[in-house]
Image (cartoon, helix red, strand yellow):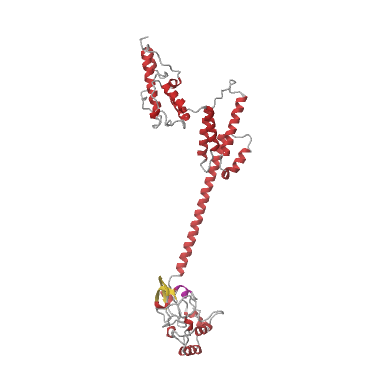
Amino acid sequence: MAPGGGSKSKTTDPSSPFYLAGSDSPGLLLTIVMQRGEANYDNWAKLMKNALKAKNKLGFVTGSVKKPGEDDVEEWRAWEMCNSMLNGWIHNTIDAKLQPFIKCFDDVKDLWNDLEERYAVQNFPRQYQLKSSLANIKQHGDCVGDYYTKLRAVWDDLEDSKTRKSCDCGDKCAIAKAIEEEQEHDRVFQFLMGLDESTFGNLRSHILNTSPLPSVNKVYTIVTQEETHRSISRVQDERSQVVGYSAQIDSMKQSDTSMQQRMVPNKPQDRIPCPHCGRTNHDPSKCWNVHGFPPNKSAGRGRGRGGRSAGRYTHAHATFGMDASHPVAANSLPPDVSHSASSQVAAHSVLTPEIVNKLLTLVDQPQSHEKLSGKRIHSQWLIDSGASRHMTGTLALLADITPIPPLSVTLPNGSITYAAKQGVL
């Protein structure tokens, strides 16, 4: 064999620990988990060992690959190259805050041992720490998947920290199987204890009453299915509430539209005064002044077929029904017409000549203004015909005046005006 032929075969053979691929470089990052000290050393060391094993370089940190003597120059040089490469890989996964405190060793095994001595926690304290954190892990409204992931990470760390030796009886050992089954039951209990009582209380009782007790992975599948079912039901309930709310809004809009349609001013053809009573919004051939008023109806409040709708939505009508043979303008009465006169008018269904003469007599008599309670003397009155609101052309007579949308007002003489403001008399 040629000198150096053995070492050359080791560096070119992919199964040799001295083999380096063309993509290998000191800046290669073997794992994305950065070593941050005691907090995650166990997890980092486990991932690094796995990566080095994949590269066939684990023997350099465990000591199984010894440093060759200088008499074998080629093999010694190959070992130096791999050793420097591993030093770079390990330093690349150490957090920048710890880099100043990490000593640079010539041998990668010394670097590995130094990190283990500084950051690896001894078995018993480490187990106590893991079990304490395991007891404090609860769902607390989190997703079941996130909660289970936290438990699984602690279980794996606990398994790595144990020093229990494997049984020599093989896979058929009943004791080993019993220990594994008991350990699996403990994990099921821990998983169920941390679930939210309000959400999975009934499901927990159902699982515990199952015989034999399912594995923790099976229990996790059952719980996630229940979570998905609850999520779907909750979404359907929310959609039903939204649909109900939308239907309620549509009903309110229809109600508002109907009200607006009822409050629309009368059409021009409906505003033609009746030749019998002077009113609008009804058929003159069916006027009550011609055919008579129905029971419990009075001329002062009747509006033919129109009823009280006109006075209800114009906000300003102040007329009353009169016999066609005795037309008397409402605004012809002076402001001194007393309340008694208006009461008498309301008590009759039709203004007869006797009532008109009596009203004129009351007008001629001087009236006391005690009932005005200090208010200004009105210059003009409109007798109430039963309308819900009254009208005046003098803003000075009103208080608390506020603007309103213009509303059409039909006057007793048949003319039309508009009310733009309202106030308190």
Between residue 58 and residue 344, name the one nearer to us.
Answer: 58
Q: Quadrant of the C terminus?
A: bottom left
Whether residue 55 appears in magenta in the rendering, the answer is no
Q: Quadrant of residue 29?
A: top left
Rendered residue at 48%/62% (across/down): 252
Count of marks overlaid on the render: 0
- Residue 32 screen position, x and y as percent: 42, 31
The image quarter in which residue 201 lies: top right
416, above or below 83, in the image: below
Left or right of 190 on screen, residue 14? left
Most distant residue in the top direction: 1
Residue ID at (37%, 17%): 78
Residue 8 seen in the figure: no
Relative depth, front residue between 352 and 158: 158
User: Magenta stretch?
Assistant: 309-313
Residue name at image x 52 percent, y 34 percent: 152
Residue 216 visible? The answer is yes
Q: Position of residue 145 (x, y in %)?
A: 51, 39
Residue 259: x and y, percent?
A: 47, 67
Residue 280 screen position, x and y as percent: 45, 78
In the picture, the quarter occupied by the N terminus is: top left
Magenta stretch, main secondary structure, is helix
Work out whether 312 lies above or below 167. below
